[in-house]
Image: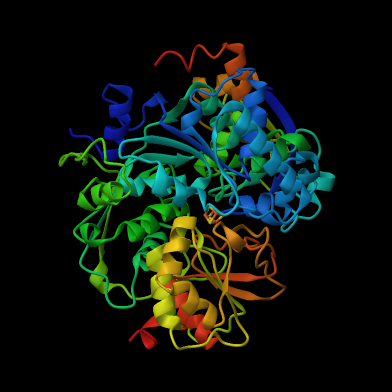
Amino acid sequence: MGLTLAEKLLSLKTNREVRAGDIIVTRVDWVLAQDGTAPLAIRQFMRLKKDVLFNGHRVIFFIDHAAPSPRRELSNDHIFMRSFARKKGAILHDVGDGIIHQVFVERYVNPCDIVVGADSHTCTAGALCAFAAGFGSTDVAVAMAFGKLWLRVPESYEIVIDGRLPKGVFAKDLALHIAGKLGPGGATYMALEFKGDLIEHLSMDSRLTLTNMAVEVGAKTGIIELDDVTCRFLEERGRPPRYRDMKADEDASYARRLYVDANDLEPLIALPHRVDKVVPVSKVEGKQIHQAFIGTCTNGRLEDLRITASILRSRKVHRDVRLLVAPASREIYLKALREGIIDTIVRAGGVILPPGCGPCVGVHLGVLGDDEVCISTQNRNFQGRMGNPNSAIFLASPATVAASAIKGEVTDPREVLS
Amino acid sequence: MSVIRGRAWKFGDNISTDLIVPGRYFHLRSKPKELAEHAFEDINPNFARSVRRNDLVVAGENFGIGSSREHAALVFKILGVGAILAKSFARIFYRNAINLGLPVIMLDTSAIEDGDLLEVHLDEGVVIDVSKNLSLRFKPLPKFLLDILKAGGLIEYVIASKGVTAFHEV
Ligand code: SF4
C-alpha cells in the first residue's frame, strides 16, 4: 500500500519507510518560538546544560505576540530572548517584522522540511508541503539542543475540494466549513491533506488560510502537495525549491475522506465561543458589533488587505465600530502601502496596527470591554480569547468583517461587493 | 508516583488553554507561580485557592485545546495536581503534560463527580472512584511516555540518558 503525504515527508527525513502509528525520532530543519513560548523554551534549554544550539541558523525567535510590549514584564522577556539569541547565534525577528508563521513562510521554509514550532499554528507552513507542527516549549528546547524530536507518525484525513469558490466566498469560509464539519476535536492527532481541483486554483495566500486552521480541528498539521503555485512562490523569493514534485501515493490509505464541493459554499461565520458553531452569515445578519479586526496568521495577508480595501473604497467605517487592521508582516505592510491599500483603510476610518498578532491573543491593542462583540478574521473565538471572558467573538472572512465594519452589524459581503 | 490519591475537580468538554491560563495574564508567563494563582479563574474561581496536592483534574472531551502554551500544563504542576483525567486530550497539551512529568490519563470520566475521592494506579491502568466504589480501567501509557513521566519530564529524561538514548540513535 502507498504512502500518505505525511508518511512520505517523514520517511524522506528518516531515510526509511515509516507508517502511521510509528513512534519515530526525526531530525528537524527548523525550530521556532515566539515571545509567549520562547522564554520558557530558553529556560528549559539551559537546564539541559548543553552550551550550543544544534544549529543557530536553524533556530528562529519571533517577537510578535506582544509587539511592541505593553508591559514591563514582557519587555523583560523580550530582553531575555534578544540576549540569548545574540549569545547563541540564533536568528531573531524583532518588533515590527511580523507574525511568526507569515515571516517563516516568506523567508525560510522549503518543501519537505520538518518544522518544530512552539506555537500551535506552526501547521500553517504545511501549505508549502513541509511537515510543520506545533509543540510546547520543552519539546522545542530539546529540538534546539539536538535538532531532533520524537513524534508519532500521524494518520491522515483526505480533504478533497472540487469546484470554484463563488463570489463573496473565500478560503476562510472553506476553512470554517471544514471546522464545522469536523468539530474542534474531530481530527485530533491527524494530518489533514488538502486535495482536489480547487486547490490548484488557490493562491498561496488562500492556501495558508486553509492549513493555518488545521489545528482548530485538533490536527497535528495540514499539508498541500507541491505544485507550480508553490514553486513560483519560492522562486519569486529567490528560494528555489529543492524538490519539485511531492505527492501522496494514489493508493495511500486515509483514516477518513471529506469531500467538499466549493460551488455550494456561501459566506460563513463561527458563533461564540466555538469554532465549529458555523452558520451562513445570512443567519446572523443584523447582529450589532463593536470591534472589527482584520489580520492574524489566518487572514492578515496581501490578498486579505486587497479585498478589505476594495470594500472600504469610498465608504466609511460605521461610527460605532472600531476597525483594526494588522498586516501579518513587514513585507505585506510595504506592499499594501505601495498599492494604496493602507491609504484607503485609514481614510475609511480604520486603524492600522503594527505587523504582529495584535489583539488576537488578548494581550493588547484592542482588548474587548464587557458585553462587547467583535467580528474577526482570526482562527479562534474561545471565551476570553481577546482578553475578556465577558465578551464575544465571531469569526469570518476579511470580506465579511469589512462589510460588517461599514454597516455596524454582521453583514453578508455579497451585499457590498460590486 | 504510581499511586495518586486525591479529590476530583470536574470540568466539561473542550476546556481551552485560554480558560486554563487566560491570555490577559500573558505577562506572568515568566512568573509561573503567580500565573498559577489564576488557573481556571474564569470557570472556577475557587480552584487555584483550594486545590490540594494530588487532587485530580477530571474533564470531558478534548481537554486543553487551543494554543501551545506549555504554561497551561505547568500551572497544574505548580499547584500540585496529581494527574489530569479526560475522555480525550488536545495533542499539544497532552505532550506538554508528559514533558513536564504530569500524568495524563484517557478514560471515560462520565461517572466521576466533582469532589469524589479518586485513586489512580498509573502502572496498572486503573482509576478507583473510592466515593462511588467504582473501578475504571484505562490503557496504560506506552513505555516510552511512562519512562519520561517517571524521570520527572523530558528534560530530566534527556539528562538522565545523557541525551543519548532517544536523540542520538537516528
Ligand atoms: S495571530 Fe493569533 S493565532 Fe496567529 S500566531 Fe498570533 S496569536 Fe497566534
Residue A403: x and y in percent read 46, 82
Q: Taking the image as drawn, is residue A280 in sight?
A: no
For the N terminus of chain B, which image quadrant? Answer: top right
Residue at 73% across / 52% down in the picture?
B25
Q: Is residue A331 visible?
A: yes
Which residue is located at x 61 percent, y 41 percent? A37
Image-quadrant location for residue A248: top left
Residue extending furthest right? B49
Q: On the rendered structure, is A210 left or right of B159? A: left
List x then y, in percent, for residue B144.
50, 21
> Residue B38: x and y, percent?
77, 50
Q: On screen, A371 above or below B43? A: below
Viewer-proximal residue among A416 and B16: A416
In which quarter of the view is residue B153 placed?
top right
A119 sits left or right of B43 in the view: left
Vertical side of A285 occupied by A21: above or below: above
